[in-house]
């Protein structure tokens, strides 16, 4: 492993969020943080960063970090030495494999892992332990695209590249809120629209931000994408828009696929009927697609996360094959991956239905990889995909699980069942950055501290097949180690030392590159043989490059423009999709469909973005979006609360009424977990039906019901440190400037709050009580700064979160601000007259001083103007003092002016 | 020929009555003021300020000599009225000729009470009521005498503050469990205690004075729990009693104070009373504000205009020992009422608003009294406050922001 010496110089690295893979310039600030900027030279972003990337510097602190290995002893996690933790993991795994066989062990990996980490995990399991039970959260993200690509292309190949987005004349986004989820790419598309006049079509049940100011929005019914693209396929065929030459030379299966398309949606009318769109919109779409040679169709989770996701991908690919718009400048299908290294994971074979380096489980492939790895017990068949893997855990068939860098207790469908399943494990190992998350809290036995972004070093691959370096610019904190080192150490203890004696990430990368080229001869798309002998120095200096990078050949940046597919006959395949149908039916008790997805400023389960106050400001509470008609039908109102229930679980969420939602659907973001909210873990609501080819779950169409949920009180807490809130409370935590904010709603008696606050608040304490009016507000101070404050009130009257948040952020709260702080209102424009001098007439010092400044020279003159001092007269001495002070000040000023002249 | 109108008492009530008469009945009466203090009327409220050295003794005079003369008022200070001959309409004065009156106004104020305990007549035992007391206390303070002030009401606190400010080590003993119990609720009194203690005054609550020890001169104060406080002087500030002797001896109706009706008329038609000596509808007020209101009513009545005094919503609104204090109405708030409370001890702020039947019925404020008069207005108006309830604690400017033009 490499110990790095962080100097204050700038390091080029890559953003750890979405699959765009933007280059980042990180400059450590010397105190644990870093200044972040976009890398102008990186071809993914040319210097631009989105809100999440820009805020990376706010997320690298060590609060809540896991810094040393821990083992559960008698119920509680206790710190242990690395050697003890590794011995324990190896010993237990060995025992379970010996007793129950290799298939009783599983790895669940993450698109956050670097390619080198992924490679070691995959090699260890599939080559040495002897099972393909290695799957990854990428399964939830783009497995349908992988399967669709493999069916059509014979390999998991993304044919296009980002330049196509700049060069296309028509950009069709299907099931993609790129404006929020791939913002930098979306900005490239918008620039294309502005500068080149490219048109943009968005196909999505939700009218997302991506759909604002575009040329055509198609709000399809959930699950009907295949019908739309079948109709398009038929239209292309019937209107003479086919590239017959391309079809003839380079493809097979055209007739069967077209016949199936015709039976699904044989006309504009049939398409409109199937998709819920107007005939006019359908016709417009067909015509625009037909007439625009340079068309890129981009698809993402709205296509992938479906029990027919693979068919949807192929329905799209059929249209591109039929028009020969494949791997050409500005004309290609384009899968937008969700994660920073989903592509790298695919390249090493980190999915249960892949073996390695884009090789599968055919006997020659298994043999080839076995020989390359010198693998003693190579897996010979596919392992269990994510959903099935956790089902096997629940049935007790898998007894040991090692989770790396992901949070399945939140993100998997039917997440409550997943969480309970993990509690049955005999050995439950988690490699993590954080001390606590829902998965860690689901009964982990061994907790291993892994390096985080900024500390780890290796490579990632973005959506356009571009490999970039993630470089460390911060020292490894505590005893945290690279994931590859952790697995290598366990491998050595399992007796596989020869295969895992890695000294560096570069060494692993060279082996990975060599495997990609091993007996390849142009038969496999993934080949980076040109890098198999890269020196350590050259690896450190590696500039972003796209694969393929075959040894001795010029790199090519696109695939399939002239055919050359990776099927046995070299032809691209048209695929006949199944008739589109959602896996589950709505019923009278579950009349709506639950759609899930990301929001702009958060990433996955917020373990990282949740640390940023800037990102927390956008949407601080978990919410459910509902169409106004449905809102009135089900009795929920904007900014109120609602209980959202499926057959699998329930959430209580803030209601956002918006006509961006489609009638009959609800949208809930995926990011909230039990770490940061009480009732917003939406994974528990999602059905686990999945696609027969990709195993990807149908996360966007679970039958659901919604009902209003009343809370008498709303409120918020702001604190310098994290707090345990009272029980039976709806809450959501968000990072704010200077600390943490908790937004909450409650039905319990107000009197619980003073008691709760008592041990938290310090000596310097202010409070406001109107229990009769349902209001309690309090603040404690340290020095001139708010330490903790609490605002509770009736719904819509808890105090102004934004106003109080800005006061909380201030290092100094002035006396006047403090006077009005507990009003919970903005005091801008509320003039202060200063402390009262004349009690009888309520005249303040500021008013009196103004009058003196305006010329009043005696108490009587002040009295004549302001009445001050004319009743009981007890303030007259103070009036005289104020007059004297003003005179002195004026005299001093005069003297000073005199001296200066 | 003007009718002779004689005012007995030369204090703040008398001065205000003269002022009001000058406005409403100029020339109708030949006014004479007779008072036993040897100086022109002064602002008694400011005595503690004089004691504290914040104001000169001469500065507290209410009106200069000229002012009285300009209004044709005969002021005779340093004379003590001894008897009213109701039948002859004559006021007898010690060592002087009697004065005839057509109308007589009693504005005799009140006297400081001395506790009925052994030793209360020892040398070094004083009260705090007039300028002569102030001079005496200043001498004590200058000599750094240890002083025990008995009484934790407004007067006692003011005396203690003045003495401490003037340099004397002061201990204040109070019979009750909180300071100013007639004006403040528990938390307000507690905060006031904290703030007053910060000024170097030692305060003992639940402290019942049983006797004053000393051989001819005060040496110590003994409390009911047996403890002793060494002292060079004792100041009684444990209450006042309306000065009713003159009225009582003249056979006027007297309860605690001189009984008056809504035009401040006593049981004898040509005799009136106002200020601290008067009792209106069963209440003797000990504050200047009601005396001023009474003065206004009486002046109108004497001018032959319709007027009636309906009683005052008593508000305490002043600085006690340098701390702003306001209380009005039902500031305790019992059953059937609700309390809104804002407290911020470090800022020295405590505010409580009492609401009953949707109306503001009482308030007590310590430290921050910016909105005292607004609250008093709201209490007096008795209108529903639902619309401003959320913000009223934070002041008029927040609750009733000026409408944009």
Image: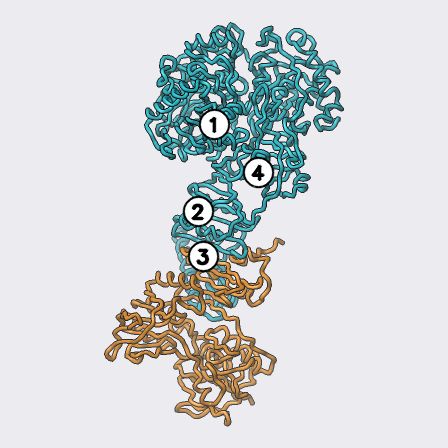
Residue B396 spot, x, y in % from top left: 54, 58
Residue A406 is tagged as: 1
Is the Cβ of the residue at disc 2 closer than 8 Å to that at disc 3?
no
Is the Cβ of the residue at disc 4 closer than 8 Å to that at disc 1?
no
Q: CA distance from mark 2 to mark 1?
A: 32 Å
Residue B21 in view of the camera:
yes
- In the depicted view, which residue is nearer to us: A341 or A756? A756
**Does dot 3 land on a helix, a strand or a loop?**
strand
Vertical comparison of A82 with B180: above or below:
above
Q: Residue furthest left?
A: B215
Please give the letter of the chain rendered in orange: B
Q: CA distance from mark 2 to mark 3?
A: 16 Å
Please give the letter of the chain rendered in cyan: A
Q: Chain of mark 1?
A: A
Left or right placement of residue B233 versus residue A460 in this view: left
- Name the residue that disc number 4 marks: A623
2 or 4: mark nearer the eye: 4
Residue B147 spot, x, y in % from top left: 30, 71
């Amino acid at each position: 492993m490499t110990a790095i010496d962080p100097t204050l110089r700038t390091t080029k690295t890559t953003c750890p969020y979405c699959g765009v893979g933007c280059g980042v310039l990180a400059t450590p600030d010397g105190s644990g943080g870093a200044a972040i900027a976009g890398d102008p030279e990186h071809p993914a972003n040319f210097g631009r960063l989105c809100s999440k990337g820009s805020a990376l510097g706010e997320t690298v602190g060590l609060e809540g970090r896991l810094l040393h290995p821990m083992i559960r002893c008698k119920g509680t996690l206790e710190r242990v030495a690395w050697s003890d933790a590794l011995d324990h993991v190896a010993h237990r795994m060995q025992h379970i494999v010996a007793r129950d066989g290799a298939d009783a062990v599983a790895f669940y990996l993450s698109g956050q892992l670097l390619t080198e980490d992924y490679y070691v995990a995959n090699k260890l399991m599939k080559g040495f332990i002897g099972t393909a039970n290695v799957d990854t959260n990428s399964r939830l993200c783009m497995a349908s695209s992988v399967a669709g690509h493999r069916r059509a292309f014979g390999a998991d190949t993304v044919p296009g590249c980002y330049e196509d987005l700049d060069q296309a004349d028509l950009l069709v986004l299907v099931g993609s809120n790129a404006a929020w989820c791939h913002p930098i790419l979306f900005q490239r598309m918008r620039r294309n629209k502005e500068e080149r006049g490219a048109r943009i079509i968005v196909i999505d049940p939700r009218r997302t931000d991506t759909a604002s100011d575009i040329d055509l929005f198609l709000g399809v019914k959930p699950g009907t994408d295949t019908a739309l693209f079948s109709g398009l396929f038929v239209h292309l065929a019937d209107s003479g828009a086919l590239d017959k030459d391309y079809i003839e030379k380079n493809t097979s299966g055209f007739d069967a696929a077209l016949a199936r398309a015709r039976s699904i949606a044989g006309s504009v009318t049939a398409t409109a009927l199937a998709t819920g769109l107007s005939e006019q919109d359908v016709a417009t779409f067909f015509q625009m697609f037909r007439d625009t040679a340079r068309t890129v169709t981009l698809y993402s989770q709205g296509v992938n996360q479906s029990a027919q996701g693979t068919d949807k991908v192929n329905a799209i690919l059929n249209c591109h094959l039929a028009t020969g718009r494949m791997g050409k400048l500005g004309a290609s299908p384009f899968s937008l991956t969700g994660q920073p290294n989903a592509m790298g994971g695919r390249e090493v074979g980190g999915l249960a239905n892949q073996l390695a380096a884009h090789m599968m489980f055919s006997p020659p492939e298994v043999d080839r990889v076995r020989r390359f790895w010198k693998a003693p017990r190579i897996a010979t068949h596919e392992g269990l995909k994510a959903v099935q893997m956790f089902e096997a855990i629940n049935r007790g068939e898998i007894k040991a699980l090692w989770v790396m860098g992901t949070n399945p207790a939140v993100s998997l469908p039917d997440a409550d069942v997943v969480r309970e399943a993990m509690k049955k494990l005999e050995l439950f190992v988690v490699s993590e950055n954080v001390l606590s998350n829902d998965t860690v809290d689901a009964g982990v036995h061994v907790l291993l501290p892994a390096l985080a972004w900024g500390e780890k070093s290796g490579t990632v691959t973005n959506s356009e097949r571009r490999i970039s370096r993630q470089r460390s610019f911060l020292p490894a904190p505590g005893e945290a180690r690279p994931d590859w080192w952790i697995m290598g150490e366990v491998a050595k203890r399992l007796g596989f030392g020869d295969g895992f004696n890695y000294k560096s990430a570069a060494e692993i990368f060279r082996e990975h590159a060599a495997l990609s080229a091993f007996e390849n001869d142009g038969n496999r798309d993934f080949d980076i043989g040109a890098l198999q002998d890269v020196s350590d120095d050259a690896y450190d200096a590696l500039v972003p490059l796209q694969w393929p990078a075959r040894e001795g050949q010029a790199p090519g940046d696109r695939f399939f423009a002239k055919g050359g597919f990776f099927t046995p006959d070299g032809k691209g395949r048209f695929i006949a999709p199944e008739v589109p149908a959602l896996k589950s039916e709505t019923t009278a008790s579950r009349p709506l469909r639950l759609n899930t997805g990301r929001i702009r400023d958060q990433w996955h389960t917020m373990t990282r973005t949740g640390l940023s106050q800037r990102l927390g400001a956008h949407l601080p509470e978990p919410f459910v979006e509902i169409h106004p008609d449905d809102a009135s039908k089900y009795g929920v109102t904007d900014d109120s609360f609602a209980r959202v229930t499926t057959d699998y679980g329930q959430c209580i969420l803030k209601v956002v009424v918006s006509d961006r939602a489609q009638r009959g659907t609800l949208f809930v973001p995926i990011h909230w977990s039990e770490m940061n909210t009480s009732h917003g873990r939406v994974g528990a609501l999602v059905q686990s039906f999945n696609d027969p080819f990709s195993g990807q779950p149908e996360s966007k169409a679970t039958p659901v019901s919604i009902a209003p949920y009343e809370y008498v009180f709303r409120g918020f807490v702001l604190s310098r440190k994290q707090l345990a809130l009272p029980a039976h409370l709806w809450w959501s935590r968000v990072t704010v400037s200077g600390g943490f904010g908790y937004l909450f709603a409650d039905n319990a008696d107000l009197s619980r709050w003073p008691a709760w606050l008592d041990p938290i608040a310090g000596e310097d304490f202010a409070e406001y009580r109107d229990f009769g009016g349902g209001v309690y507000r309090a603040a404690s101070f340290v020095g001139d700064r708010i330490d903790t404050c609490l605002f509770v009130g009736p719904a819509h009257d808890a105090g102004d979160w934004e106003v109080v948040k800005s006061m909380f952020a201030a290092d100094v709260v002035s006396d006047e601000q403090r006077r009005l702080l507990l009003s919970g209102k903005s005091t801008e424009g509320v003039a202060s007259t200063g402390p009262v001098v004349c009690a009888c007439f309520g005249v303040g010092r500021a008013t009196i001083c103004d009058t003196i400044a305006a010329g009043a020279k005696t108490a009587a003159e002040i009295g004549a103007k302001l009445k001050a001092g004319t009743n009981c007269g007890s303030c007259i001495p103070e009036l005289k003092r104020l007059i004297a002070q003003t005179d002195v000040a004026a005299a001093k000023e005069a003297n000073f002016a005199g001296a200066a002249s | 020929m003007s009718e002779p109108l004689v005012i007995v008492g030369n204090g703040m009530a008398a001065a205000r009555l003269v002022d009001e008469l000058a406005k409403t009945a100029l020339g109708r009466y030949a006014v004479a003021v007779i008072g036993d203090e040897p100086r022109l009327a002064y602002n008694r409220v400011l005595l503690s300020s004089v004691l504290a050295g914040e104001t000169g003794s001469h500065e507290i005079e209410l009106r200069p000599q000229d002012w009285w003369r300009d209004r044709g008022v005969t002021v005779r200070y340093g004379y003590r009225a001894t008897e009213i001959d109701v039948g002859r309409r004559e006021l007898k004065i010690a060592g002087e000729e009697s004065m005839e009156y057509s109308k007589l106004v009693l504005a005799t104020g009140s006297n400081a009470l001395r506790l009925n305990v052994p030793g209360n007549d020892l040398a070094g035992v004083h009260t705090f009521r007039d300028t002569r007391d102030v001079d005496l206390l200043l001498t004590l303070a200058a000599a750094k005498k240890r002083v025990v002030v008995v009484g934790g009401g407004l007067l006692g606190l003011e005396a203690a503050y003045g003495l401490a400010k003037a340099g004397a080590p002061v201990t204040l003993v109070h019979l009750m469990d909180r300071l100013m119990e007639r004006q403040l609720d528990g938390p307000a009194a507690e905060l006031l205690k904290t703030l007053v203690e910060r000024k170097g005054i030692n305060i003992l609550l639940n402290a019942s004075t049983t006797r004053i020890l000393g051989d001819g001169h005060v040496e110590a104060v003994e409390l009911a729990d047996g403890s002793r406080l060494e002292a060079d002087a004792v100041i009684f500030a444990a209450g006042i009693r309306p000065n009713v002797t003159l009225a009582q001896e003249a056979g006027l109706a007297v309860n605690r104070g001189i009984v008056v009706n809504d035009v401040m008329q006593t049981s004898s038609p040509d005799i009136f009373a106002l200020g601290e000596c008067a009792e209106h509808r069963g209440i003797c007020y000990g504050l200047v504000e009601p005396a001023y209101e009474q003065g206004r009513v009486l002046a109108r009545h004497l001018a032959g205009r319709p007027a009636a005094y309906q009683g005052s919503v008593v508000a305490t609104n002043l600085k006690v020992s340098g701390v702003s204090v306001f209380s009005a109405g039902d500031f305790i708030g019992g059953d059937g009422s609700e309390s809104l409370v804002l407290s911020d001890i470090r800022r020295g702020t405590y505010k409580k608003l009492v609401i009953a039947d949707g109306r503001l019925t009482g308030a007590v404020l310590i430290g921050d009294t910016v909105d005292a008069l607004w609250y008093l207005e709201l209490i007096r108006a008795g209108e529903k406050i639902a619309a401003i309830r959320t913000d009223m604690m934070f002041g008029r400017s927040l609750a009733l922001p000026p409408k944009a033009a």
